[in-house]
Image (cartoon, coloured by chain):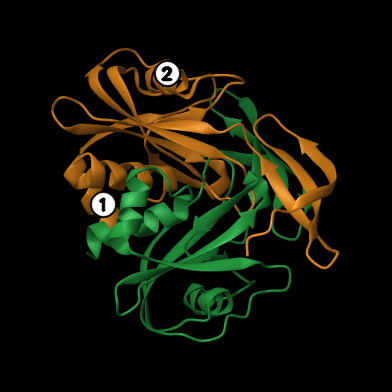
Chain colours: A green, B orange
Amino acid sequence: MVIKEETMNSEIIYNGKIVNLRIDTVELPQQKYSKREIVEHPGGVAVIAITDDGEVIMVRQYRKAVEDAVLEIPAGKLDPGEDPRECAARELKEETGYEADTLEHLVDFYSSPGFTNEKIHIYLARGLRDGLAQPDENEYIDIELYSMQSLLDMASKNMIKDAKSLVALLYASNFKG
Amino acid sequence: MVIKEETMNSEIIYNGKIVNLRIDTVELPQQKYSKREIVEHPGGVAVIAITDDGEVIMVRQYRKAVEDAVLEIPAGKLDPGEDPRECAARELKEETGYEADTLEHLVDFYSSPGFTNEKIHIYLARGLRDGLAQPDENEYIDIELYSMQSLLDMASKNMIKDAKSLVALLYASNFKG
């Protein structure tokens, strides 16, 4: 049986720029207790943007956490109170320069519900118009275009290493193909 | 251009049971510096286990981080030095009681490379034999079986909320269907 864990105590370890860390003490059946390490994250959006020619806009950037240059769909974190769709339009424009006629919500999901509340909202962008990228200061992003079929081939060879990008590509291919 | 970020300083904020938190100061072009909040995680495995009758073994458990009972494929974190395949067999047995004749590596990916190094290895388990589950103390897990088509229908309606489960289901459906 699934049992809701009531919070008996909550200790804030760190409040950061992107994430916070807290330790909750939770009550379990038979008056037992356990600790839960929880990484708070504001949540984010990611955009699978497909041009009229059927190409998908990908970005490559250095990710310090994994010490690698990772190929991903454009994405970013939500500002406080920001609507996910507006965030999707903003991040697509900032990172790639593209603006979209339509942004369709595809799916949202938890990145890793065992330890973080990060939720990612995926949008499908169509009707793209190219423009000038406006990356944040300290953001160094390469833009790379691939056909959907190339990306699916890369995914099948485990060359796409980012969860949100895998979900978005496979989801669009399965349900919007 | 993608630029590797060299670590100038690394400050450990917290060493936990599941995650550690550290803040790296990195060097950027033009002698600029930035901070990176990084959640260290040992990595994990997840198993899409399909019975001879075509049913997929799912687990439901309360996830404190997201305050919800989440439907997921069986999964767990790697012990230090543990082989991912052995971890997959161990977690499948512990959480569901099932043992598999074959465990095929499908794909691995980063959960959220913007802030954590967590890498998840997905295995496809076939030739299942039922047995007695041996959950960890303080683990309360329900086992639920669904046909692959039901799960894909649920995914298409955004009823699967866990990234690794979405990747595994869509990946198996696309490339192992």
Residue A145: x and y in percent read 42, 68
Q: Earlier in the sequence, mark 1 or mark 2?
A: 2
Query: Farthest residue in the left direction?
Result: B53
Residue at the location (35% across, 22% down)? B96
Q: Residues within 10 Å of mark 1 (few under 14, many from 20)?
A: few
Q: Residues within 10 Å of mark 2 (few under 14, many from 20)?
A: many
Residue B48 sits above or below residue A39 on the image: above
Residue B51: x and y in percent read 20, 26
The chain to which mark 2 is attached is: B
* Amino acid carrying mark 2 in the image: Glu
Closer-to-camera residue (A18/B61): A18
Q: How many marks?
A: 2
Q: Which residue corresponds to mark 1? A: B154
Residue at the location (73% across, 53% down)? B5
Closer-to-camera residue (A134/A106): A134
Closer-to-camera residue (A27/B43): B43
Q: Which residue corresponds to mark 2? A: B94
Give the quadrant of the N terminus of chain A.
Answer: top left
Residue at the location (62% across, 80% down)? A134
Q: Is residue A142 left or right of residue A52?
A: right
Closer-to-camera residue (A94/B146): A94
Identify the image quadrant of residue B132.
top left
Q: Secondary structure at mark 2?
A: helix
Residue A147 sits above or below residue A153 on the image: below
Residue A52 sits above or below residue B74 on the image: below
